Each structure stands twice: as C-alpha cells, then as structure tokens.
Amino acid sequence: MDFNVKKLASGAGVFFTRAVQFTEEKLGQAEKTELDPHLENLITRADCTKNWTEKMLRQTEVLLQPNPSARIEEFIYDKLDKKLPSRTTNPELLGQYMLEAAQDFGPETPYGSTLITVGEYQKRLGGAERELLQTSAAGFLTPLRSFLEGDWRTISKERRLLENRRLDLDICKARLKKAKLAEAKAAAAPDFQETRPRNYVLSASASALLSEEVDKAEHELRVAQTEFDRQAEVTRLLLEGIGSTHLNHLRCLQDFAEAQATYYAQCHHYMQDLQRELNKCANAISAPHPPAAVCPDPVSSAFLSGPPSPGAPVSSQSSPRPSTLAMEQTQLPVTGTRKAKVLYDYDAHDVSELSLLADELITVYTVPGMDPDWLIGERGNQKGKVPVTYLELLS
C-alpha cells in the first residue's frame, strides 16, 4: 500500500511538472525543443491522412446507407462484435410489394402482369445493390476503419509519449540552466565578511552542493535526451508507415470503384431489359385481335427477341426479326469483327445469348438491324448475343 501511494505521488508530481512546463511554453516563458523538420512533415501528413480518412469513411457510409437509424444499428452490432441481421434493400421491398399487389389485382390482367414484370426487375436491382453493399463494406470501409481503430491509435499513443519525453527534456534543460546560474552566482560573489573558520567550511560545503546539483542535472539531461531520441525514432518509423497505408487505401479505392462500375452496369442492363419487356407488354396490349393479351413471364421470357414459348400469344405489331437468331446469325452479313475484353461475368438468359467470364477475350461483330446495345460474340465454336456494357472493345 505504501508503494502504491508513493508511486501515485511520484506520478502526480511528474504530471504537475510537465503541466507547468507546457504552460510556460505557451506563455513564452520557457524554451521549447523543436522537432526535426522531417518528423514535423510526417506528423502533418499523418494528421491530414487521419482527418480525410474519417471524412471519406463517414460519407461513404451515408452513400451506401442513407438511413441514419440503420447506420446506428450497424455501428452497435459492430461494437458488440455480432453479425448484423440480413436487411431487405429498398428495391427488393418495392419489388415484393409489386408482386403482392399483382396477386390482388389479378396476374392475368395487363396491370397485374406488368406489376409482376417490374417487380421482378426491382428485386434484381435490389440484389445488385446488396452485392454492392457487401463488396464495399468488405473491400473499402473495413480497411478504413482498421486504420483509424488500429494503426492510428498506435501512432497517437506514441506521439503522446514523444510529447511527454520532449517536456521531460525541456524540464531537465531548465533545471541544468538554473543550477549553473546558481553555481556561477556563488562563485562570483563569495562571502568574505566573516573570516571565522566555520564560515569557510560552510562556504566550501555550499559550493560542493551546487557542483553536485549541476552534475546531477547534467546526468538527468543526458538520460532525458537519450529517451527523447529513442522515442522520436520509434514515432518516425510509425509515421513513415503512412505511405504503406496510402498504397493499401489506393487498392481499396480501386476495388470500390470497380464494385460501383459493376453495380451500375448491372442496373443499366436490367433497366434496358425491363424497357424491352414493357415494350412487348405495350404492343401486346394495343393489339386488337388477341383475346387476352398479357405480358410475357419475366422469369422465363427471353431478354431479346428469342424463340417464343409454345402457345404464347404473338403480337401483330411485334418486330419481324427472325426468332431463331442464334441459329441463323451466321448467314447474315457481318459489318466488321473486332476483339473485345470481357469486363464482368455474364450469365446467358436464353439460348440466343453467350455466357461470359471476366477478363477473357472474344470476337464480336454486329449484323444489320440488330439492337445497338448488343453484339454477336464468338468464342471458339460458341456464338451468341452479348451486352455491349460488359465489354471493352479493343482496336
């Protein structure tokens, strides 16, 4: 118990001495040891990195999850180290409502069948958004949080320790300065008013004490300087690691941009398919002769003009393009072949389309009268329609 009290009193004394030194420095009454210019630049760079990382993290969270209540819930689950329950995205919820409304209105009615078509595509958009959220959280948000909650805390701790070592060094410098001034003053103005031997003994003893005080202050200064230099080196090494952090965040930023590009390409593709489906619905509804014109099933129907389902009503105003394009496209005139690099994976929706794998090279060309958003792709003996948005055309 006595040891703890002494330790506590010693710690309080050190804290008070540092506080006095810090206050005197702020008031201009004490000298301050300046850090190395290179170290100062590293500190400025680290502070800038921390501030902008916090801002980008918060704004990315707002972008991916605009609902503040949902963000608070995610924060609580993250702090409790628990898995966040699966949450339905807004497009998925809208699509589910549309499908339920279609059942009440009648799936055979034009309005009900259109609700089914749009609802299915809304659920696909929601699935793409869910994938974007998961990819962005794992590849971009998590590394930013790891830096702020891990590396930056370590850097901040070492910087505080460096500041304490600097204050201790300046305190030792001030103490040595005072001791030397007192010794010089005693040597410059000796007391000769009394010549009794006792006074000579006292004068010699005082000089010895002052000299001993100077030696002690010099020793403490050397120790403080060594500790300060050691801590400055540790802090410098940690701050130089900010460069590696920038490289890591650069890779994460590229992954985030790629995830966004994939998401928007999928959304663009889905909306183009939805427009084609709605055009088919409009043509079927406006046709006078079919007894019950309904939209094609969005799940089983072709995304483009593919083979019609047996027994399905065919609109008199539909496109005269042959339904067996995948079988007959080799007989149509080719307008020019080019090489193309596949940007994203693509699963064919029917036999007229060609499935794609990211980063592979295929040969593409178009045919007269073909939808400008699609090309004919060839890979070996395989051939089919491919979406332009999934390709990078090469010269």
Image (cartoon, rainbow, N blue to C red):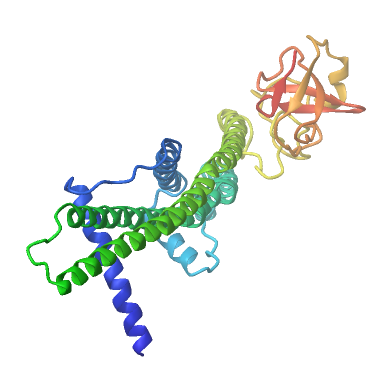
Q: Residue drawn 68% across and 22% down?
A: 319
In the depicted structure, whether residue 373 falls above or below residue 239: above
Q: Nearer the viewer, residue 236 or 55?
A: 236
Which image quarter is the C terminus in?
top right
View extreme (right): residue = 381
- Seen in the image, is 9 located left or right of residue 308? left
Q: Nearer the viewer, residue 54 or 356?
A: 54
Q: Position of residue 38 (x, y in %)?
A: 45, 36
Quadrant in the rendering for residue 33 = top left
Q: Residue drawn 42% across and 36% down?
A: 41
View extreme (left): residue = 193
Q: Nearer the viewer, residue 324 or 380?
A: 380
Is residue 131 in view? yes
Q: Position of residue 297 (x, y in %)?
A: 66, 43
Q: Position of residue 64 (x, y in %)?
A: 47, 46
View extreme (bottom): residue = 1
Q: Residue drawn 59% across and 44% down?
A: 128
Is residue 105 in view? no
- Seen in the image, is 308 located left or right of residue 289? right
In the depicted structure, whether residue 187 falls above or below residue 279: below
Which image quarter is the N terminus in?
bottom left
- Seen in the image, is 162 located left or right of residue 358? left
Q: Nearer the viewer, residue 136 or 281?
A: 136
Q: Position of residue 362 (x, y in %)?
A: 82, 24
- Seen in the image, is 38 located left or right of residue 83? left
How many numbered marks have been drawn onto this rendered protein structure?
0
Q: Residue drawn 55% across and 61% down?
A: 86
